[in-house]
Image: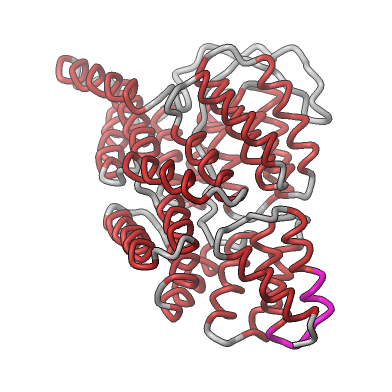
Amino acid sequence: MTVLLLACAVTVGGLALGGDGGRAHAPVSAPPSSDVPVGRGAATGLAGTVSTLQASLRERPGDWLGWARLGAAYVEQARTTGDPTRYPQAERAVARSLTLRPRENDAGLAGRASLAAARHDFRAALRDADAALAVNPYGERALAVRVDALVELGRYTDALAAARHADAVRPGIPSFTRLAYVRELLGDPDGARKALEPALRSASRPDDIAYVATALGQLARSQGQYAAASRHYATALRAVPGHLPALEGRARTYAARGELGTAARELREVVRRYPLPGPLAAFGEVLEARGERAAAQRQYALAGTWADLARANGVAVDLETALIEADHGDRSAALRAARAEWSRRHTVHSADALAWALHRTGRDREALPYTERAAAPGFRDATLLYHRGMIERALGRAADARRDLSAALSLDPGFSPTGSAAARSALAALEAGR
């Protein structure tokens, strides 16, 4: 199955949404802040920002805020280009900021929190976000990272409270997109949509429009609403032509509809510009579904190469490794990675990854409790349902397997070019009594 990654960094907007039901409210006044804005644009704009900051810091090497901003910009560059070698640069810049100003430096602490989150060290991210908020309770980056860290530690109730708090004290796109995502994880996709639709209507900056429209597209696609997803991606691409997340989402929608040639053409361009495990695995699955197995294996191998590079630059990539290896590589390696990920954090995705790796290595009885952990918050995802159904089938629980495989295909019939085909084949065998 393709890798599901949380998009942690988003653009900044001015819309205020209520924490319950999407009611608009007046923003709370905040004091002047040295906070570093979250996700201020595309890679091309960030390159200019980095160059400007570097030049400024050569003239003023004691500028602690400039170093914090440079560190944050490096993290954003890594996010928008898929280049993990930016992380050590970010680490050095943030450390310089905190050395120059070791106390009352919310920007430096928030930058370090953002870097920790980008490297998937979510306990450190939460610690540093809390430290930054102790200095500046209105810091946009720290508020956003705090929600992300709680989500990625599996603390969904706390994450919902943190997202509502962020929306109340610093309303804007970083807060209400996170609020929408937590609602989706807690089994309320309609609530997530109701949070995002007013945001899209009120967004004015092109980057904001593209981000929110893409989020709506991802939500619609995950619910099998492919026509709506395509409309949202088109909105994003009108706002920001070439917006990579929208291009990837549109390509995945083509794949879900069975338009594999178009999907392959678009995903080829996505991975050329953004060679991360998720798009690489998606491209590989499209190629595999087209019968191009050798080409597909090259994409899976490239995902492994990226993981090695990311690991060398301090990123924990066990979740990505577990999911790709379980389906397309070394199943024993998948299980080792899944166990390592579970030892660090208990989320719906780490529980599912461990369940699936156990299944793929023939340990279905061990796998079943983890599928139950993955389902506990109420999150409805076709890939998770498919995994659970296949585990139940392997255990001889035919009625449960039919229920969950049918639910996966009903929710999102084209959730994966290879997985949905396997689900249909397994369901047909179950219906035939095999």
Residue 137 sits in which quadrant?
A: top right
Q: Residue extending furthest left?
A: 58
Q: Is residue 274 or residue 82 the one in the foreground?
A: 274
- The residue lying at 54 percent from left, 38 percent from top is 250
Q: Residue at x 35, y 47 (%)?
A: 275
**Can you say whether 213 is above or below 185 in the image?**
above
x then y, percent, for residue 420: 63, 63
- Say whether residue 89 is magenta: no
Asked whether, in this view, residue 138 is left or right of residue 276, the answer is: right
The residue lying at 40 percent from left, 58 percent from top is 316
Q: Is residue 156 above or below residue 192?
A: below
Magenta segment:
394-403
Magenta span main SS: helix
Front residue of 232/201: it is 232
The quarter in which the C terminus is drawn is bottom right
Residue 125, image x and y in percent? 48, 45
- Image quarter (top left, top right, bottom left or bottom right) of the N terminus: bottom right
